[in-house]
Amino acid sequence: MKGSTYRRCSCRDPKTGKELGTSCPKRNSRNHCTYSIRQELPFREDGSRRSFARGGYTNVKAAQADLDHVRALLGLAKADDPEGIQLVAEMLAEVSGEKLPLPDVEETRRRLKAGQDLVGSLTVAEWLDRWLAGKRIRKSGISRYETDIRVHLKPHIGHRRLDRLRVSHLSEMFTAIADGNAEVLEQNTQRRAAVQELATIPWKGAENRARRKALKAALDAMPAFRRVTGPATRQHVKATLRASLNDAIGQQIITFNPAAHVEIDPVRKPKALVWTDERVAKWEQTGEKPSPVMVWTPEQTGAFLDFVADDRLYAMWHLIAFRGLRRGEACGQPWSETNLDRHSLTVTGQLVQDGWEVEASEPKTDSGFRVVALDDDTVSVLERYRKQQEADRAEWGSAWVNTGLVFTQEDGSWLHPGKVTDLFERLVAASGLPPIRLHDLRHGAATLMLAADIDIKIVSDTLGHSDTRITRDIYQSVLPHVGKSAAEATAKLVPLQRKAEQEERARKAAKKAKQAAKAKAKGKKKGKAEEAARKG
């Protein structure tokens, strides 16, 4: 195919504005004109012509080098590969039109062979936008991905070419996030100190008012209180990027996923602890929880349920406490999937919170779809609740909102999961019991089942876990009496000579003490008899 280099003068006639071209009086000057190249490309599939054109070269040598580069790229696709020929031609047409640098020949050969896009100019930000737009998941999941992309990924690596993203770039990103955390903590400390100082300044007096005004101005200039990016958030950012890059590999845009190899601090999940008497005493003194995840003892759970027995949503607290439903599952449980005659309910959906908006959704995982058995007492509680709901329906009449859900507001409309959590926390505070989260009622249900020697597989299925290891790792908070029983049972399995000797010595000592007691008693009796004889 035809191709050539040529000189071009861009001078224009001051009167007409047209290019002078070969009539330019300075054309023969050595450094006046620039050089350009043009290379014919394979025809389009519709038969139309196209070409690669580029100008602005200062000398013919540079122009010829790029022309040879273009021809080398055209030579990558063989004559018996019409698809490859078209791909290379489309790449060169795009490079010419967008004025992009000519791609490396060997890199293009590799991409062509691997079936990847030949133009690697796609940035990380552009790919993330494309990837997010193609996701078909629930709204709350999209929002979480969007936050990771907007707050962390785009600002740090969005400008980088997708095909040139490396592990080192991601390490630098997470280092920058950690540095940003230190800055946020310092700024929060400064703002907190200023707020505390402001609270100590009296309102009266010209000098005090001036100090308050200056301090308020300083506070306005400071950044607002912000949260740091913790280990769990950093792991989620990494997971978001990894998922998007895996999809890029699946679409043959890239061949390597650096997010799968970058190392960041692991997330240390808080251990669930039981509210023992000692921990309750310390909490009453200091107000501090030993762990973010706390579990009530059976007695404490019973005390709470007794305290809220008259609450309109008592049946919900009872169901979560004994059967371990998640908050969203309880809020979204329909009567159509609740069979009290058969003592079971089927979890098929949930209400999820996105920001403050609520939407109905399927369970998060396949294992979330499950049948949960109900005990007699729970069935009785739900039957009483259904009668109350029917009375509410009659009272509201035509204004009743027929959602078909088990737990609703008084008019039958959806319960807001966030408001349910707020209500639970107020009830716990009013009860005087040590604090737990609503989700910790689910922890407690799992703990009670495990303490009752329920098979771990049944517990896992009841909770909707995909693997029994999740149940063991997260929910097996050992209650004190269960741990003591296990310790005693374990100790009895090991025969110890030292232990046998100690028991023998203890028996002899007890026998000796008994004999001494008898002798003493006999002596006292004899002494009394002799004294009585003397008196007689």
Image: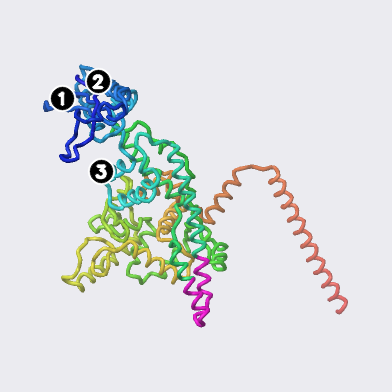
Q: Quadrant of residue 44?
A: top left
Would you say residue 205 sits in the magenta stretch?
Answer: yes
Could you say which is closer to the camera, residue 437 or residue 214?
Answer: 214
For the C terminus, the quadrant is bottom right
To which residue does mark 1 refer?
Answer: 43
> Between tags 3 and 2, which lies in front?
2
* N-term mark: 3 or 2: 2
Label 2: few (<14), some or many (≥20) within 10 Å?
many
Query: Which numbered tag is attached to residue 134?
Result: 3
| Residue extending furthest toward the front | 25
Q: Position of residue 387 (x, y in %)?
A: 25, 68
User: For the magenta stretch, what is the residue range?
Assistant: 192-214
* N-term mark: 3 or 1: 1
> Between tags 3 and 1, which lies in front?
1
Q: Name the secondary structure under disc 3.
A: loop
Please name the residue shown 30% across and 48% down the image: 369
Q: Is residue 74 left or right of residue 326?
A: left
To which residue does mark 2 refer?
Answer: 77
What is the CA distance from the residue labelled 3 to the residue labelled 1?
A: 33 Å
> Between tags 2 and 1, which lies in front?
1
Q: Quadrant of residue 6?
A: top left
